[in-house]
Amino acid sequence: MSNILVIDDEEMILQLVKNGLQKDGHIVSVYSSAKQVSLDNLNHYDLILLDVMMPDIDGFSFCEKIRDLIDCPLLFLTAKTMENDITYGLGLGADDYLTKPFRIAELRARVNAHLRREKRERHRSLNFDHIKIDLSAKEIKVDNQSVSFTKSEYLICEYLARNKGQVFSKEQIYEAVFSFDGESDNSTISTHVKNIRAKFGRMNVQPIATVWGIGYKWE
């Protein structure tokens, strides 16, 4: 199950796409204008379907605006079939396109193929409202300012962030991060989390929540 955002100014297409993708178990949010979409919520989506020809803000312009803010596949739905239009859209950072009119079966297949590939590939970064985790550099930034974490603190943050919203016990976190080969034991996870929160707190963010009696989660 994935969260999918669909933006198209044609109500009939919105309902067709929503109904089709819901059959595959996805959660689908639909909007008739890109202006209705909150940029703060973009990272909650696993894939974005974007119409090109819209009256308020066209899909190419919106893609250019958000591409650096998201780390998920973006597919154009377009009546523009000229090769230069398609090349331009892909050059803006789109991952794929479907030309209108399209078959809903093909759209479902394309969407699910991109989602499967996304699960296989390692993301370059994890992006949240104010926090960015660079998976290659092993670095965490808050509002573009680097925050210094120990190796263990970083690994805990990465593990929880990769599984955003899922609750893990201290034992589960310790096993996932240290594989029981570390010098500490799972009781030190509480100390690590305390230190992580103190560092995030100095940046006025607090992404790790305690679920009393169970463990922790990245919100």
Image: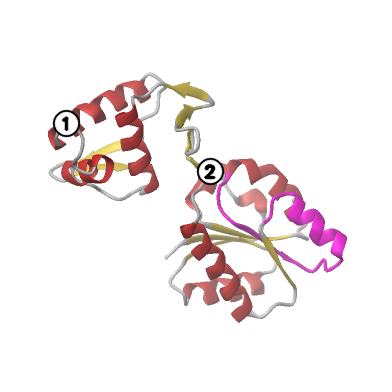
Q: In this view, does 124 lie above or below 31?
A: above
Q: Is residue 218 above or below residue 191?
A: below
Find disc 2 in the rendering and name its residue: 124
Q: Which of marks 2 and 1 is nearer the N terminus?
A: 2
The residue tagged with tag 2: helix, strand or loop? loop
Q: Which amino acid does label 2 sit on?
A: Arg
Residue ranking furthest to the top? 202
The residue tagged with tag 1: helix, strand or loop? loop
User: Which residue is drawn at the image coordinates 57% and 74% (left, top)?
Assistant: 108
Whether pointer 2 and pointer 1 mark residues with C-beta atoms closer than 8 Å, the reply is no
**Residue span colored magenta:** 70-94
* Other-residue count near label 2 (Cα within 10 Å), few / some / many at <14 / 14–19 / ≥20: few
User: Which residue is drawn at the image coordinates 82% and 66% (left, top)?
Assistant: 80
Q: In this view, does 178 lie above or below 202?
A: below
| Display colour scheme | secondary structure
Quadrant where the N terminus is found in the figure? bottom left
